[in-house]
Amino acid sequence: MGMRWVGGFRATGWAARLWPALGALVVAVMLAPAALAEQAEDWQIGMQPGVTPVRDQIDFLHDKILLPIITVITIFVLALLLYAILRFNVRRHPTPSQTSHNTLIEVIWTTVPILILLVIFIPSIKLLYYVDRTQHADMTLKVIGHQWYWTYEYPDQADVSFDSTMIPEEDQVKRGLPRLLEVDNPVVLPVGATVRVLISGTDVIHSWFVPAAGVQEYAVVGRTNESWMRIDKAGTYYGQCNQICGLNHPFMPIEIKAVAKEDFGKWMACQKKPPKEGCGQFTTTAERKDGEATVLAAARSAQ
Ligand SMILES: [Cu+2]
């Protein structure tokens, strides 16, 4: 059995076997989110992959600006701490200095954080305004939060509207659908269309949160909040109410199906004038066929 260097100590026996296993675990955890697209995953440590321009900008702010800055600050503070601990401990430095003020250092440690905050402030404000609204929407989706489900309205599509309720947990499990995320009537949107999202509520404050789209907006009674999204990749995207809104707060998920324009047209036509037997593959009733659910689940696991 070979010996390995572990942080300056020689590890033998079980410790030598533990470190490669830990390394493999870390790699597995880092790769896990990359393999799956649209919902939170076990062992996920990063953000879900994004599918809208807004999310691209959020990722840029997080990955390229905030994370590097906070990493440098954390390492710098850690280094200062270690230096103080090692250099000025009672054994190596028995007589402490009586210095209490140093103008130069005080000016530096006041101005440098201000400059860092300015560097963060400018792109943050730009992003806030970018997320706020779109000037050129192709369509509007209205989202209304209730205890404990969502209503969706398409005001520029003959006022099509429907409620979206979580299907029972045991059905989700039985049919291989994402637990606590699958709904009876998902929102259907065309890929590539700029969608103005208007969000309101009828009882308490809810929050419409779809991580892959980078949208999180409060649903408040008597107020219409606005955001927007342009989903660039077909798929199913899940979200949840993320404002504690009462007893069934965890049971009002959000499901968006982003589909090709033609499919959206067919779905919308069916919503406007449904045939007796429902709207085919986009059927929006709770009686969705189990066969279809199986196909959906198979498509998901094949992704
Ligand atoms: Cu809620």
Image (cartoon, rainbow, N blue to C red):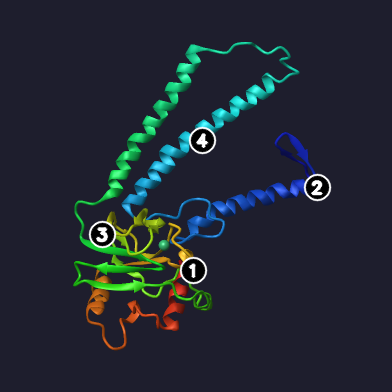
Residue contact at pointers 3 and 2, CB within 8 angstroms: no
Decide which of tag 4 and tag 3 comes sooner along the chain: 4
State how far apart marks 4 and 3 are (Cα): 36 Å
Identify the residue position indicated by label 3 in the image: 195
Q: Is residue 80 visible?
A: yes
Q: Amino acid at mark 3?
A: Val
Q: Secondary structure at mark 4?
A: helix
State how far apart marks 1 and 4 are (Cα): 35 Å
Q: Nearer the viewer, residue 254 or 246?
A: 246
State how far apart marks 1 and 3 are (Cα): 26 Å
Disc 4 crowd rating (10 Å Cα; few below 14, some 14-19, many 20+) is few
Query: For ligand 1, which image quadrant applies?
Result: bottom left
Identify the residue position indicated by label 1 in the image: 180
Front position among marks 4 and 2? 4
Q: Amino acid at mark 1?
A: Leu
Lateral position of residue 147 relative to residue 199, left or right: right
Disc 3 crowd rating (10 Å Cα; few below 14, some 14-19, many 20+) is many
Q: Secondary structure at mark 1?
A: loop
> Residue 297 appears at what percent x and percent y?
47, 73
Identify the residue position indicated by label 2 in the image: 13
Decide which of tag 1 and tag 3 comes sooner along the chain: 1
Decide which of tag 1 and tag 4 comes sooner along the chain: 4
> Residue 88 appears at what percent x and percent y?
68, 19
> Residue 221 appears at what percent x and percent y?
32, 60
Disc 1 crowd rating (10 Å Cα; few below 14, some 14-19, many 20+) is some
